[in-house]
Amino acid sequence: MSALLGHDPDYLRRLGAADTAREIAQQPAVWRQIGRMTAESCAATAAFLKPLFDRPDLRVVLTGAGTSAYVGEVLAPSLRRRLGRRVDAVATTDIVADPLACFAEDVPTLLVSFARSGDSPESVTAPELASQVLTECWHLVVTCNEQGRLASRHADGSALRVLLPEAANDRGFAMTSSFTGMVLAGLLTLGGPDEALVERLATAAEQVLATGPGAAADLAARGYSRIVYLGSGTLHGVARESALKVLELTAGHAVALAESALGFRHGPKSVVNEQTLVVSYESNDPYTSQYDRDMVAELLRLVPERNLVTVTAQAGQPASGNVWGLPGIADVDDAALALPAVICAQLIGLHFSLALGRTPDNPFPGGEVNRVVQGAIMHPLPPTPARASG
């Protein structure tokens, strides 16, 4: 039986890590499937989107909860530049809690809903509230679960559904291939198909998967109690997702924080001590990356060099020492860079979980936190007065 991320699959199964490890490892193959799928459906996608994008006043809102919300945070900056229009990332949890604030402007809106299962209460309720409070609202659903309530409620042809390959519907607790799959599907659906780019990203990811497990295991063996992820612009969303992976996979036994390079100086840097690992994502944008490098230089004066890892496409080699390289993609947009970059965090989260004696596939066997969120009561929105359009 072939090794899985450098481990015997039976060994990982005994540790309760086989699903998570497999889903991390399968990502290049899943991305290639998504690349082909979006290319094959581009005519139908264009027929739905072009009339909307022809409207200069259209607002695009990217929404989801938890990891699915970070999909929108990664995509929004890139799509603003590509589309030359307003694109906002707004979590479903914010929409449900205060829909009139999230949609204060009654303007034509395309709501793009990202969800792994599509069965969490907020995933289902947020699109309903958007349609309730907006005069004109269209729906694009990107999900890994065709049988979920979100996909089922938008199956009548009035919305555009992007259904990811079945493999992307992760069985493990933490979202891994579902996250990168939805980022890629959103990027290619809204920004245009690009199979050549997908192949480059998949190749870079395969090199990270070849060298990253050993580097991640080495970090986990050092006994860090805190991890900080730093990322600027688009990569701030990647940093937030990375921190969440550590919290989820270790069941909160390793504390994780995410910040931007500039924002880190404004108080959050207080978390750094000798037990802190700092992982800095370097932007591919030459202007933005200056701030990332400045922070790395500053941190090297404060912490041991071994406590600081830089993830960058500007290095020529994969994971080695304190620089984890993403070969062959030094010129891609940061939203695309996010896909192989976040695999580094997934590997770190997995190995920290194993080092702490947790079970990554189900870090909360007592049900304190669930794979599909439970317990949230959706309250009906009272009737609201008619609003003037924006």
Image: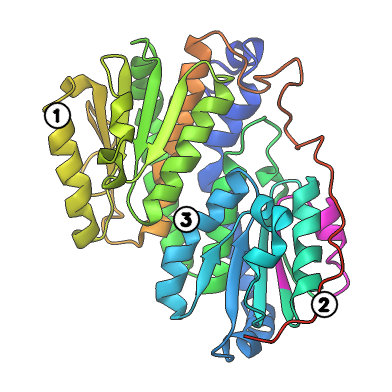
Above or below: residue 277 compared with residue 30:
above
Which sits earlier in the primary sequence, circle 3 or circle 2? 3
Above or below: residue 366 compared with residue 59:
above
Q: Residue at x 31, y 55 (%)?
A: 329
Q: Is residue 118 visible?
A: no
Above or below: residue 284 compared with residue 9:
below
Q: Residue at x 62, y 77 (%)?
A: 105
Q: Is residue 383 visible?
A: yes
- Residue 111 in the figure: left or right of residue 219: right
Q: Look at label 3 and name its amino acid.
A: Val
**Residue under numbered circle 3:** 74
**Residue under numbered circle 1:** 300
What is the magenta range?
139-158
Marks 2,1: beta carbons within 8 A: no
Residue 75, image x, y percentages: 49, 61
- Given residues 221 and 39, the one toward you in this image is 221
Q: Look at label 2 and name its amino acid.
A: Ser
Q: Quadrant of residue 284?
A: bottom left
Disc 3, SS: helix
Residue 16, image x, y percentages: 65, 16
Residue 259, image x, y percentages: 37, 41
The residue carrying pointer 1 sits among few (fewer than 14), some (14 to 19) or many (20 or more) residues within 10 Å by Cα, namely few
Checking the image for residue 158, the label placed there is 2
Q: Quadrant of residue 273?
A: top left
Which sits earlier in the primary sequence, circle 2 or circle 1? 2
Disc 1, SS: loop
The residue carrying pointer 3 sits among few (fewer than 14), some (14 to 19) or many (20 or more) residues within 10 Å by Cα, namely many
- For the residues marked 3 and 1, what is the alpha-carbon distance in whole angstroms? 27 Å
Disc 2, SS: loop
Membership of 300 in magenta stretch: no
